[in-house]
Image: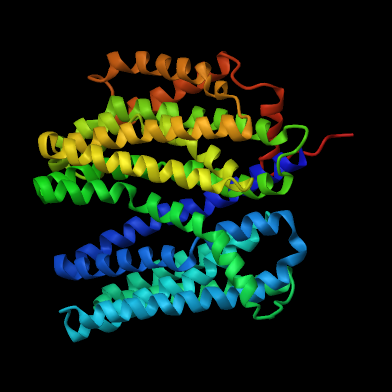
Amino acid sequence: MNDAKRIARNILVIMGGGTFRAVLMPVFTVLVARKLGTEGFGAYSFALSLAYILLIVGEMGLPKLVVRELAADRKQVARYMGDLTVLRLVTGLASMGIIYAIIALSSRSADTRLPLFLIGLSYVVFTGLRRFFDAIFQAFEVMKYQAISDLVDILLTFGVGTLLLFKGYGLVGISYALMLGAVVSMGVDFLILTRRMGKPVFSFDLTFWKRMATGALPFGVIGLVTFLFGYTNTVMISAFKGDYQAGLFSSAYRIVWAMAVVPATCMNAIFPFLARIGRSADGRHREVIRRVVKYLACVSLPFCVILALFAPQLLSTVYGESYLEARSALWILAAIPLFSFTYIPLIDLMNAHYKHRLSVYAILTCAGINVMLCLGLAPVMGFVGAAVSTLISEVCLLATTLFFAWKHMRIDPRLLGNWKPALAAAAGALVCLPLRGILPFYGLVLTFVACYLGALFALRTFDATDLRIFRSALPVRAASRS
C-alpha cells in the first residue's frame, strides 16, 4: 500500500501542476494571438513548432531511458547527473545550430530573427535540460520537485510575458519571458537536484554516452512519431482539401488529443515503479496494469460519451459557431480514448521491461496504416476521411499492443473487460438524452457526471483495495481518536 500511496500522491502532484499549465498557457496563447496579429502569431507558432520538434529530436528519448535505468539502480545518480547533463547540453547546442541556420536562410525580417532564436534557445537548451533533470526526479519518485520547477516556469512566462505584451514589446517581449521562465526553472531544478540527490560526477566516458544514446533512440522514435501522428493528417488534408478543412479536422482532433494528458500523467508516476519492480515473480506488474487500465476506463468512457452527446456544444463553446461543421469528425474521433487509454499503459509496461522495440514496431506500423488510409480517404471524404483513418489506426495500435503484451509479457487481454464503467456511462447517457432540449450545456454535463458516478458506485465497480488506494491519495487523513 505504501507504493500505491506514493504513486497516487505523485499523480495528484503532477496533475496539480498540469492544471496551472492547462489554464494559464491557453490564456497566454490567446493574448499573444490578439496582441501580435496574424503575421506575428504565425511567426511565434513557427518558432514554437520548430523548437518543440528539435527538442524531441535533441533529447533522443533520453529522459525516458534515465527514468527506467535510474529507477532500477539509483546508485548511479551522480554519474547520470554529470555525464548525461553534458551530453544533453551538446545535443541541445547542436539543435540550436539547426534553428540558427533555418532562421538565417529564411526570408524573415531582421527584427524577428533574434526573438525567434531566443524562443528556440529557451526550448531546446534550457527546457531540454530541465526535462532531463525532471526525469531524475521521476526515477526517484519525488515528482513534487518537478511540479515546483514547472510552476515557476509557468508563472514567470505568463506573468512577465503578459506584462511585456501590454507594454508593447511584442514578439521580443514574449521571447524574453520564455527565456526567463526556462532559465530560472532550469536553475531551480538543478539546485534542488544537487541539494537532494547529490553532487554530479563528470567522467566524460564516450562509451557510456554511446550506450545511453543507443538505448534512448527507440524512446526518441516513439516520442517523435507520436507527436507527428495527428499533424500528419492535418498536413495531408490541407494539401488535398485546403486549409479550411484542415482547420476543421485539427479543431476536433485537438479536443481529443488534450485528454491524452490523463494517461500520460498517470504513467509518468507509475513508470518508475514498473521499472523498479521489473518482471516480478509475484506478478505485481500485471496487477498494477490491470488496475491502471480499470481506472483509466472509468475516465475515458464518460469522456467519450460527453463528446458523442455534446459535440456541437463543445465545438461552439471552445472555438465558436464557425467550427460546428467539425462535429462529424468529433463524433468519429470521440471513440479514440477507449483505445488510447489502454494502449498507453501497455506501451509503457513494455518500455519499462526492455521491450521497447515492440513499442516502436507497433507505433511505426500503425502510423504507416494511418498515412496510407488518409491518402486514400482524404481526397474523397475530406476531413471526415482523416478522422476515419485516425480512428482505424488507433484500433490497430491497440490490437498490436495487446498482442505484443500477451505474447511477450503474458498480459491477459481480458483486462479490457471493464463492463461496469461502460454500463454506468450508458445509464448517464440515457438520462441526459431526453434533457438535451431542456437543460443548458453545462447543466447536461453536470447531470451526466452525477448519474455516471452514482451508477459507478451502485454497480460496486471498486473493491476494498481500490478504496484504500483512493483514501491513501488524500492529502490529509484524519487522525484516529484515542
Coloring scheme used: rainbow
Q: Nearer the viewer, residue 476 or 379?
A: 379
Q: Toward which corner of the image does residue 376 lie, by quadrant?
A: top left
Q: Is residue 50 left or right of residue 377?
A: right
The N terminus appears in which quarter of the rendering?
A: top right
Number of dots carrying numbers: 0
Give the percent coordinates (x, y) of residue 186.
54, 73
**120 w.r.t. 464: above or below:** below
Give the percent coordinates (x, y) of residue 412.
60, 24
**98 w.r.t. 363: above or below:** below
| Residue at horizontal 46 percent and vertical 23 percent from the top | 450
**430 w.r.t. 76: above or below:** above
| Residue at horizontal 57 percent and vertical 29 percent from the top | 406
Q: Residue furthest bottom?
A: 110
Q: Residue furthest right?
A: 482
Give the percent coordinates (x, y) of residue 256.
34, 39
| Residue at horizontal 55 percent and vertical 48 percent from the top | 356
Q: Is residue 461 left or right of residue 56?
A: right
Give the percent coordinates (x, y) of residue 209.
60, 72
Q: Toward which corner of the image does residue 93 lie, by quadrant?
A: bottom left
Q: Is residue 106 left or right of residue 18?
A: left
| Residue at horizontal 66 percent and vertical 72 percent from the top | 81
**478 w.r.t. 181: above or below:** above
The C terminus appears in which quarter of the rendering?
A: top right
Residue 172 in view in this figure = no
